[in-house]
Amino acid sequence: MVEIVPGPFTLEGKQAAVQKEVRENYDTYFARAAKTRMWFPDRLEQRDEMPKYGHLISDETKELLLGFLGVESVVDDYVFSGINAAGDSVATRALYVQWGFEERRHGQTFRHSLIDSGLYTQEYVDKFLADTAEYHWTFEEQTGYEETPLLGAAYAILQERHTRWNYTATRMRIWEEYGSPTDAQGKRIFPAIAGAIRFPEIDEGAHEANFLNIVKIYMKYFPDQALDALNKVSHHYTMPIVQLPNADEFIKCVLSAGMADAKEVINSVMNPSLQKMGLENRRALRKAVQNFRKLPENAVVHIQNRPLDGMVPDEETEVYEMLPSGDFILKTNHDQPK
Ligand SMILES: [Fe+2]
Ligand SMILES: [Fe+2]
């Protein structure tokens, strides 16, 4: 049910509305996660298949999997940074805790995959993790900005989508290394690591959707801030900068797998994320930021073909539709007789 919030809004009123909608979003997220994404890395049945398929994994893929393990293992820094930025907001804090729990199981999935496939010994992997843990990730170092809940969510949209995209590519790559197995009907089957990586992959998609929802909530009440945040994080976007013990090899393999190709990242990560926010590409985003400055103060904005949900501005407030090009068109006609 959507509660109708009458305008105009005070700053406090808008902040309260954001908090309330973020909380509702997180309730939905929890309910869905418990129903559709309840899994535990220890219990994945694909683990039993790993010893048999281990020898088929190439050296490059082995390095990629170790690197992903390293990146997933700094997730505590990532999540704590988000919690700090969220401040005393209980709703956001709870969301970050759940998110952290889900990210931790990704690291565990890679750890099991490497060890159970006989690619590295447990001692080696745990030493690698201990070395990685000496490095601490910070949002500021990553993006050049001090983290706020909104900036954190905007960066996370891109990072989560990028991670999912990397995992999909790795799953397909492993499938090929396994000899492109299919079932009797010719349908592709994904055993061992190729099957296990599907679980983090699906989680990352849910994370992307979640952070998109959060930024959309800000877009409704603080469109200027939401556009500014997207602009900031997409300007110099890179995957989490982490100092990995296997950094050189990992980067070499990421490059050769095409996962760091700037054009690919723009086409497969950046632009699809912006399109979900109603903008064509980065140029449209920059244009929207500039055009927004020309709109009257307190103007209300909605994404094209997605009218404001749960919000009825009063007659004084001008409502604009944001086009995929970054232009705005006025939707209310104040010249009409009242
Ligand atoms: Fe993850
Ligand atoms: Fe994630």
Image (tube, grey):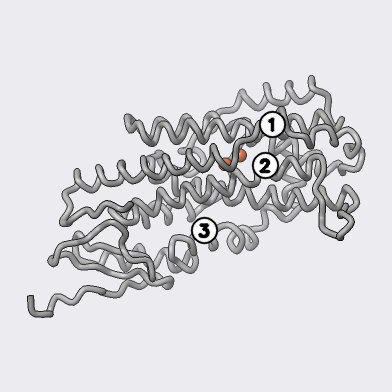
Checking the image for residue 127, the label placed there is: none
Residue highlighted by disc 3: 273
Circle 3 Cα neighbour tier, 10 Å, few/some/many (<14 / 14–19 / ≥20): many
Of tags 3 and 1, the one toward the viewer is 1
Q: For residue 103, what is the image quadrant? A: top right
Of tags 2 and 3, the one toward the viewer is 2
Residue 129 in the figure: left or right of residue 310: right
Q: For residue 36, what is the image quadrant? A: top right
> Which amino acid is tagged 1?
Pro
Q: Is residue 100 visible?
A: yes
- The percent position of residue 197, horizontal first and vertical second, equals 72, 42
At x 78%, y 53%, the residue is 172
Secondary structure at badge 2 equals: helix
Q: Quadrant of ligand 2?
A: top right
Circle 2 Cα neighbour tier, 10 Å, few/some/many (<14 / 14–19 / ≥20): many
> Which amino acid is tagged 3?
Ser
Q: What is the distance, in whole Å, between disc 3 and disc 1 at their CAs?
A: 28 Å
Look at the numbered disc 2 and say if its residue's Cβ is closer than 8 Å to ligand 1.
no
Q: What is the distance, in whole Å, between disc 1 and disc 2 at their CAs?
A: 9 Å
> Which amino acid is tagged 2?
Phe
Residue highlighted by disc 2: 199
At x 8%, y 79%, the residue is 337
Which residue is more in the foreground, 30 or 166?
A: 30
Residue highlighted by disc 1: 41
